[in-house]
Amino acid sequence: MTQANALHLVDADDIDIYPISSSERLDSHFFVPWNLKRWRGSEFRRFGYADPEVGWFGMELFFLAQDETPIGTLPCDDDALAFLLRIPPARWRELNSRDVSPLHGWHRVHCDSGQVRLAHPVVTEVAMDALGSKKRNDAKNADERMRKRLGTIINHLKAIPGAARIADMEERVNDISDWIEAQYPGGSATLKRVKEALNDLSSRH
């Protein structure tokens, strides 16, 4: 294995901090975007023509890293990598000793779990994009749930004698929503709970 492609032990202060937390999860990470133009022009693909076996196992590692913790990383241990690829450790060590190995482009990083693992800049980029999309979708879904929740509270207020005027008071509606969430975390805004919130909030004034 040439020095350029070897993975060396380095001082802790000399390696990057991995940007994705070990607590981050992608619950339905069944699709990974693949930039074909970037792949066709990549150095690793060019090397893969000379050693297709390395290219195959290299791509396997790209995809296997999506299910690791943190997302987008790999273990540094040879036996663990061989297990991920479902090949004998001796075969993995032989693959990894070639001038261009399946770990071409991977480097050691510090994870927030305290572990030192392997990361690849492209795999990290893909993982961060996926997490960004998930967070945007989560925020959108949360906004939609809140909109529906407030609408339900407003409809209940309109059905309660003497409370219809409160339905037009945005601050009071939000107070009722907050009260229900505090008393019944994750619970729905039922008519009974809206009445409870009204009685309790009214008694405080």
Image: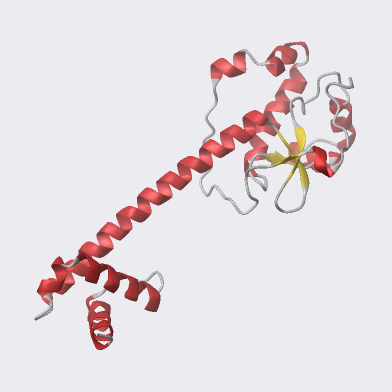
View extreme (bottom): residue: 203
Tell me if residue 134 comes above or below residue 175 in the rendering: above
| x 52%, y 39%: residue | 130
User: Residue 42: which quarter of the image?
Assistant: top right
User: Residue 98: which quarter of the image?
Assistant: top right
> For the C terminus, which image quadrant?
bottom left
Q: Position of residue 116 (x, y in %)?
A: 79, 45
Residue 74 visible to the viewer: yes
Q: Position of residue 47 (x, y in %)?
A: 75, 14
Residue 189 visible to the viewer: no
| x 59%, y 33%: residue | 125
Q: Position of residue 136 (x, y in %)?
A: 42, 44
User: Residue 119: which quarter of the image?
Assistant: top right
Q: Is residue 181 left or right of residue 112?
A: left
Q: Is residue 198 left or right of residue 37?
A: left
Q: Is residue 94 left or right of residue 65?
A: right
Colouring method of the image: secondary structure
| x 70%, y 15%: residue | 43
| x 68%, y 42%: residue | 18
Q: Is residue 140 left or right of residue 36?
A: left
Q: Please state which of residues 59 and 202 is positioned toward the viewer in this rendering.
A: 202
Q: Position of residue 68 (x, y in %)?
A: 67, 45
What number of labels is visible? Answer: 0
> For the N terminus, which image quadrant?
top right
